[in-house]
Image: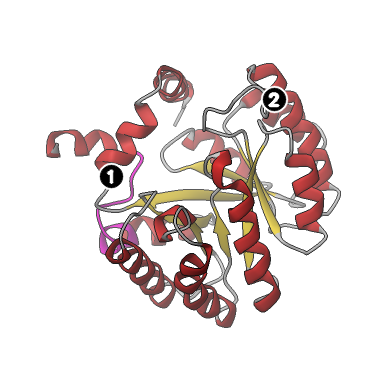
Amino acid sequence: MKLLFPFAKRFIAGENLEDASEQIVDLQDQGFRVALNLVGESGSTKEEALNAQNEYLKALKLFPMETLSLSIKPSLLSLNYSIKDCLEYLTPIVEIAHRSNQKIRFDMESSAITDSTIEICQRLNKSFPNVVGLALQANLFRTADDLVALKSENISIRLVKGAYREKKSIAFISMNEIRDNFLKLADILLSYQSDHDALATHDELILNSLLNDNIGKRIAFEFLFGVRRDLQHKLNKKHSVGIYLPYGSDWFAYTMRRLSEWKNIKFIARNLLKEKL
């Protein structure tokens, strides 16, 4: 397994927070925002949830600055089993972020927990306004309604295409349909003119369409760590750019999950070939 780490290191900041610290500082020095993500999902034990909670608390204390946010998969903190337990694990994290004026954004996972993910975000937002945000997936039919509802509560949004396989009864399947819906949702999101919102995509067809609108810094662009670094630097000259930075001991499973589907292998290969540095 260790033999694969040199490859995985292109996309993973390190096996622990100490390893990731160097990448965090380097990215911030270059003017990027950093969304730190502890890899892992679907935690099934209290020990796993507590370990994840401790990691995030440690990160907030180590980097108490506005340019660092946390990107959290709620399932790692027991959301698949109990909304109540998940909120108990999340509340101390959000409370510290509130005190240090930092942001917490919840990754959106499979549609099976979309409603519960939105619920925990809304409940935490009532106790800690302007701290929590949420990723929304452009492939889901419901997302336009979710976006408007969440923005009415001043919850920040990261718009993504959506990486989970969903039924065609609830989601767009073809890439052209997903692109079209992403652009429609981006127009809605841009109308709120919040630089805490983000468009997360490496798709140049989408990016070129958006950049033609001269959107400046009305919204941030987000990229995966290690993917299209040329675009990251190019956009960072005129726009707010964030880097989604994963780290953690579960790096092998994370990397394998990301490469498990043929389309993801093609995605990585295509974007590595396009990259010009």
SS assignment at label 2: helix
Q: Quadrant of the N terminus?
A: top left
**In the rendered view, would you say 84 is above or below 74?**
below
Residue beneath the point at 55% across and 35% down: 231
**Extreme-bottom residue of the structure:** 99
Q: Amino acid at mark 1?
A: Trp
In the image, the segment drawn in magenta is: 11-21
* Residue 64 in the image, given as x and y percentages of width and height: 48, 76
For the residues labelled 1 and 2, the Cα–Cα distance comes to 29 Å
Q: What numbered label is drawn on residue 251?
A: 1
Question: Is residue 13 rendered magenta in the image?
Answer: yes
Mark 2, other Cα within 10 Å: few <14 / some 14–19 / many ≥20 = some
Q: Which residue is mark 2?
A: 179
Is residue 38 left or right of 99 when viewed as pictured?
A: left
Residue 233: tell me if it is visible.
Answer: no
**In the rendered view, would you say 109 is above or below 79?**
above
Q: Amino acid at mark 2?
A: Arg
**In the rendered view, would you say 236 is above or below 7?**
below
Is residue 48 left or right of 222 when viewed as pictured?
A: left
Residue beneath the point at 68% across and 64% down: 122
Question: Is residue 193 rendered magenta in the image?
Answer: no
Of 213 and 7, nearer the camera is 7
Mark 1, other Cα within 10 Å: few <14 / some 14–19 / many ≥20 = many
Of 93 and 195, nearer the camera is 93
Of 111 and 215, nearer the camera is 111
Coloring basis for residues: secondary structure
